Image: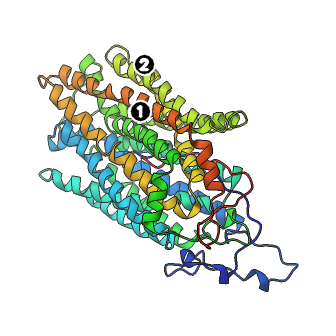
């Protein structure tokens, strides 16, 4: 895995005659195009929410999206929780093990732009429903992979990325269309809390289910059933909000531009580009640690004699359990502290968000280095350093999403989310697990327990270096954030089309990630 603004309140609801093709539904009866004509309402009738979704339904929608985001990351890291058993079952080396995460991230990454394009134009809840249904079926199928066909496990893990791409690019934009200012910040923070919690649960559930039944295949059969529940909730509870309505003025409409025009505008947005490269470093580090940390800790324990090697059917699961708990706790602490520190700093500087992101990465680097170095001498010290390293690393999740949402105009946000996913995963966690595995294999002189541990230890040191580079990108983002945010808030089309974002008012920030990821 995979961890998180802007415009202002809107006082009136757009009439049906003002809707553009951007709001056209995809065979939906509750799409953003629906809604009574304001002019036909009695003067005494209370004004409906600008989004077209009631307050109660909006809260339920956020809760459901959080639940699905938790499942998303829980499924993604279930494999990491049972990786030693998978290696033992198929008889594969570290390079092939790293491919399990790489093939998933690659399909997820390349399909994200497709769903970003569709998400800006069609009914989003139906797109997510189809994707999650497909993801659940493929995940269940992957649990029946026979011992002689490791390629089948790679294929099914790659196809899982289809479902996650349909969700991760679209869900944050729905929340952005339901709330503004502090409410949006709070809801997005809640949404991104699901990233570390879901990731930790993936390690915990995967390792403990495997330990209980002495078969790692059953670890992959937990999330598909929960995914079916998610599809039903999406179809029967979630209502599609009107795009950008909560942050536009009554006399304005939202107009889309062409995809190439959107892409050119995003690539000229320096804050978006630089923060995306910063988030790429986050993805690289989290992707590497997510897959390899439990295995590294297990090998350290075997090397020092604290644990026995894997038997033919089962490996010790305590490291995955402890790492999962640490991931849950540090994720919540990191996201919450990042948001709070950013809020406090905003009263002093408009550059607070990228500065907090930079600080988180730069502070995480030395703790991750110490965790890797101390693994052979002190298990307790290793877990303490991992705790602090992951806490600082998690400070970025909510804030990165916040930056994207307030430097990009509403009609380009799904495309921006998709582009950020492509870049951050292409250069980040799509290749980092495989790279760490290949470097580990190349450094291993013998197949002894010493070199199984030492080679992986040396390759993981790369994470600390990448964290420092990511911090530098966020420092560069701070140089341009004010200018790019003002440009997005005061954006006006060059033709006679309607204004996309209000010209006055104070925008809100919403933290997050994206999403690892």
Q: Is 428 drawn above or below residue 141 in the view shown?
A: above
Name the residue nearer the viewer: 244 or 64. Answer: 244
What residue is shown with label 2?
A: 380
Q: How many marks?
A: 2
Name the residue nearer the viewer: 85 or 162. Answer: 162
Say whether residue 206 is left or right of residue 87: right
Residue 334 in picture, x, y percent from top left:
55, 35
* Element assignment for label 2: helix
Q: Residue at x 69, y 51 (%)?
A: 507
In which quarter of the view is residue 373 placed?
top left
Q: Earlier in the sequence, mark 1 or mark 2?
A: 1
Q: Residue at x 20, y 19 (%)?
A: 450
Q: Is 243 drawn above or below residue 516 in the view shown?
A: below
Q: Residue at x 40, y 55 (%)?
A: 223
What residue is shown with label 1?
A: 323
Count residues near mark 1 (Cα–Cα under 10 Å), then give few for <14, some for 14-19, many for 20+: many
Count residues near mark 2 (Cα–Cα under 10 Å), then give few for <14, some for 14-19, many for 20+: few
Residue 425 in picture, x, y percent from top left:
36, 47
């Amino acid at each position: 895995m995979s961890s998180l603004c802007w415009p202002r309140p809107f006082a009136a609801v757009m009439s049906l005659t003002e809707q553009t093709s951007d709001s056209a539904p995809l065979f939906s009866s509750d799409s953003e195009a629906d809604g009574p004509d304001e002019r036909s309402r009695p003067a005494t009738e209370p004004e409906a929410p600008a989004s077209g979704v009631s307050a109660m339904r909006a809260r339920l929608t956020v809760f459901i999206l959080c639940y699905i985001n938790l499942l998303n990351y829980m499924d993604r890291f279930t494999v990491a929780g049972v990786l030693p058993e998978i290696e033992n079952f198929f008889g594969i080396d570290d390079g092939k093990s790293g491919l399990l995460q790489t093939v998933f991230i690659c399909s997820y990454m390349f399909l994200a732009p497709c769903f970003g394009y569709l998400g800006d134009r069609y009914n989003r809840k139906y797109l997510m429903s189809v994707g999650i249904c497909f993801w659940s079926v493929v995940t269940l199928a992957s649990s029946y992979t026979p011992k002689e066909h490791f390629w089948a496990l790679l294929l099914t893990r790659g196809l899982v990325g289809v479902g996650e791409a349909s969700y991760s690019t679209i869900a944050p934009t729905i929340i952005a269309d339901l709330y503004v200012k502090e409410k949006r910040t709070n809801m997005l923070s809640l949404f991104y809390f699901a990233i570390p919690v879901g990731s930790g649960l993936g390690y915990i559930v995967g390792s403990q289910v495997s330990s209980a039944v002495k078969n790692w295949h059953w670890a992959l059969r937990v999330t598909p059933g929960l995914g079916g529940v998610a599809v039903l909730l999406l179809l029967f509870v979630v209502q599609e909000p009107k795009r950008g309505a909560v942050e536009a003025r009554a006399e304005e409409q939202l107009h889309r531009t062409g995809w190439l025009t959107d892409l050119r505008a995003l690539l000229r947005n320096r804050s978006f580009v630089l923060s995306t490269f910063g988030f790429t470093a986050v993805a690289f580090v989290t992707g590497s640690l997510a897959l390899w940390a439990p295995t590294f800790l297990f090998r350290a324990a075997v090397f020092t004699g604290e644990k026995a090697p894997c038997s033919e059917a089962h490996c010790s699961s305590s490291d995955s359990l402890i790492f999962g708990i640490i991931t849950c706790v540090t994720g919540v602490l990191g996201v919450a502290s990042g948001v709070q520190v950013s809020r406090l700093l905003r009263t002093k500087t408009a550059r607070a968000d990228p500065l907090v992101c930079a600080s988180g990465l730069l502070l995480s680097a030395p703790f991750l280095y110490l965790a890797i170095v101390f693994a052979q001498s002190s298990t307790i010290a290793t877990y303490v350093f991992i705790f602090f390293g992951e806490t600082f690393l998690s400070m970025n999740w909510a804030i990165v999403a916040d930056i994207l949402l307030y430097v990009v105009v509403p009609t380009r946000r799904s495309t921006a989310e998709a582009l950020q996913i492509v870049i951050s995963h292409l250069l980040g966690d799509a290749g980092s697990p495989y790279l760490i595995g290949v470097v580990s294999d190349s450094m291993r002189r013998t197949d002894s327990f010493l070199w199984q541990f030492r080679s992986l230890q040396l390759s993981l040191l790369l994470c600390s270096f990448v964290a420092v580079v990511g911090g530098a990108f966020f420092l560069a983002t701070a140089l341009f954030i004010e200018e790019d945010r003002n440009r997005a808030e005061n954006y006006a089309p060059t033709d006679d089309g309607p204004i996309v974002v209000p010209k006055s008012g104070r925008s809100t920030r919403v933290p997050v990630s994206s999403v690892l990821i």
